[in-house]
Image (cartoon, rainbow, N blue to C red):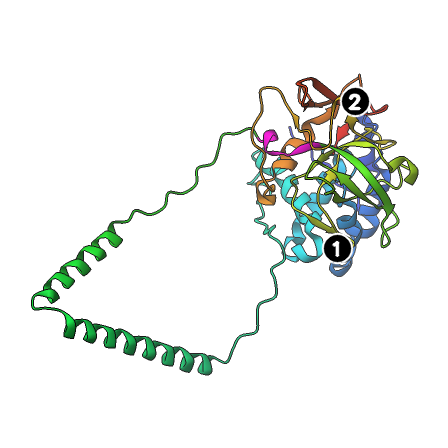
Amino acid sequence: MATVLRLNEKSSKDILLLHKYVKSSIPVEDWLAFIVLSLRSAAKKDVIANMEGKLNTHLNFNTFFVANRLTVVDVILFGILHAYTRNMKVASMANVMRWFDLTQELIVKKNGLTDVLALVPLNLDDVPEPAAPKKDDKKAEKKDDKKAEKKDDKKTDKKADKKAAAPEGADKKDNAKDGKKKEKKEKKPAAAAPVESDQSTVSRLDIRVGYIRSCKKHEGADSLYVEEIDLGDGEGEYRTIVSGLVKWYPLEEMQNRWVICLTNLKPASMRGIKSHGMVLCASAADGSKVELLSPVDTSKVKPGDRVYFEGMEGEPEKVLNPKKKYWETVQPDFKTNDDKLAFFQDKPFLIKTASGDQVKCQVATVQGGGIK
């Protein structure tokens, strides 16, 4: 017999009790209180304001709301926000839309619950450029008519000149040639549709060794660093990457250090600065630590060396298509083990070095942490 658990309008104690009963150590109390006070009984405009503000900002650097996987917080928020999908706009809450689409895939679609909660089609394309102002239709029509008349006149004149100069019987030959040309054009087959490759999803990610050449605080955001990272793009070419690591690392520790970066994400603007990638970090399950990944032996690597997973090699995408959700699909399987080494499922992160050595990736102390 199925049991239905409802979130009380004035309290979150019933959900919290269930959370403790399953012996979860993930801190969810603050989020449950926020849900009750700011979403459950709030006016529509206030819910939308929170979606555009607190929720969207939080998801800048998080796949889910509390941990590196779905929790009761994501499930409750998904249920509440399902009623507001018509108000989700990519211009103001792209992160919320991305999270919502991934969550409905994991909760509703994968568990066959579409009869309980319908799947919501979301447009995750970039905000379109403003359309160019339209010219006056009447003026445009007149210009087009004049151009067409001029072209017709020129064609007529050329045909008349050819007929005058051609010998008898040339007209028949010309007509035959014209007929053959038309047949050739009509017989030209349509281009075949591109076939989706069976390449593994994780091999489409371009994960590389990077070296932070300089780092400074973002002038418009207290929680963000702006790093210039050598990723092997060329002599003296460094990528700008924005990271939310101010809380976890002092500025001096972000200078001249080795890191592991995901380099083929679609560039995104972070408070006015375009970020061209993401530094990978491991997060403790209880949210108490966030640590940068780095090569185990930095003497054998160089900026730009690629990370691969044995038996799952392939050519990375030039830029990951956000609609395909390659990163969101594999990210929950990125983790550190008890030896603080980075893994994808049961395969270690391995760096392709010029010498042919296999170099693994590690963090300082986080064991069993999710990587993102």
Indicate the amino acid at tag 1: Glu
Identify the residue shown where x is 78% and y is 58%. Answer: 46
Q: Which mark is residue 299?
A: 2
> Can residue 250 be seen from the camera position used here?
no
Above or below residue 170? Residue 183 is above
**Between 135 and 66, the one nearer to me in the picture:** 135
**Between 72 and 51, the one nearer to me in the picture:** 51
Please identify the quarter of the rendering in which residue 310 is found: top right
Q: Quadrant of the C terminus?
A: top right
> Can residue 131 be seen from the camera position used here?
yes
With 6 as the anchor, is 290 left or right in this view?
right
Neighbor class of circle 2 (other Cα within 10 Å; few <14, some 14-19, many 20+) is: few
**Between 107 and 369, the one nearer to me in the picture:** 369
Return the disc, 2 or 1, that comes first in the chain's sequence. 1
39 drawn magenta:
no
Callout in the foreground (2, 1): 2
Q: Secondary structure at mark 1?
A: helix
Identify the residue shown where x is 70% and y is 53%. Answer: 93
In x, y percent, where is residue 322? 61, 44
Please identify the quarter of the rendering in which residue 17 is found: top right
Above or below residue 297? Residue 190 is below
Q: Secondary structure at mark 2?
A: helix
In x, y percent, where is residue 52? 75, 55
Which residues are the magenta region?
201-208
Q: What residue is pinned by disc 1?
A: 52
With 274 as the anchor, is 315 left or right in this view?
left
Indicate the amino acid at tag 2: Ser
**Between 190 and 120, the one nearer to me in the picture:** 190
In x, y percent, where is residue 354? 67, 23
In x, y percent, where is residue 252? 92, 38
